[in-house]
Image (tube, coloured by chain):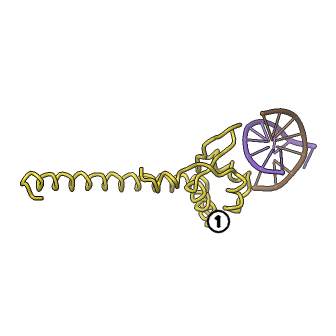
Chain colours: A yellow, B purple, C brown
Amino acid sequence: MSERELRRNLAILPIGTVRELTLLTDRQIRYYEKNNLVHPERGKGGQRRFSLYDVDQLLKIKDYLEAGDSIKDIQEIFAKQQRKAQEKHNSQDALRRSLQSEFAKIGRFGVK
DNA sequence: CTTCTTACA
DNA sequence: TGTAAGGA
């Protein structure tokens, strides 16, 4: 994982901050978590710690809900997005391996 | 004071 | 979804 991704997924925001950032109520945020739409970590005392990624997901949830989608619809949308992201990663990984292989061949001919 | 869970005159 | 209750 890149450092950029790591920071985006750093869970440090308390629910109060997330509430202000998303304009959602604590009730709604916890409800969406119960429905597996967001997965905040738990810190001391069982308190939720959200990452910027979680905030982003919550904003998407709000938009989808306002667009008329149900919780289930959103669960499916996220599942689909996750599959696509996975495929993209696999693809990039394959390209990386391919390039590494090509450069290795060139290297063997002593080109410096 | 903030957050957590549970429950519903 | 809101909100009260009772702890942490």
Q: In the image as oriented, which residue stretches furthest toward the left?
A: A109
Q: Nearer the viewer, residue A42 or A28?
A: A42
Amino acid type at image mark 1: Glu
Can you say which quadrant of the picture contains the C terminus of chain A? bottom left
Q: Would residue A82 appear left or right of A48 to someone viewing this image?
A: left
- Which residue carries the number 1 mark? A66
Helix, strand or loop status at disc 1: helix
Residue A29 percent coordinates (x, y)? 68, 52
Q: Residue at point 36% right, 56% down?
A: A88
Picture coordinates of residue A62 (x, y %)? 63, 62
Residue at the farthest front position: A112
Name the residue located 7 percent from the left edge and 54 percent from the top edge.
A110
Q: Is residue A6 left or right of residue A59?
A: left
Q: Quick check: B7 above or below A7?
A: above
- Image spot of residue A70 (x, y percent): 61, 57
Instruction: Compare residues A69 and A86 and report the one nearer the observer.
Output: A86
Residue A91 left/right relative to A37: left
The residue drawn where x is 70% and y is 51% is A15
Of all chains, the one bearing label 1 is A
Considering depth in this image, is C6 or B6 the residue closer to the camera?
A: C6
Marker count (numbered):
1
Q: Nearer the viewer, residue A89 or A63?
A: A89
**Which quadrant holds residue A17?**
bottom right
On the image, the x and y values in percent for residue C5 come to 90, 39
With respect to residue A31, does C7 lie above or below? Answer: above
Q: Residues within 10 Å of mark 1 (few under 14, many from 20)?
A: few
Residue A53, quarter of the rendered image: bottom right
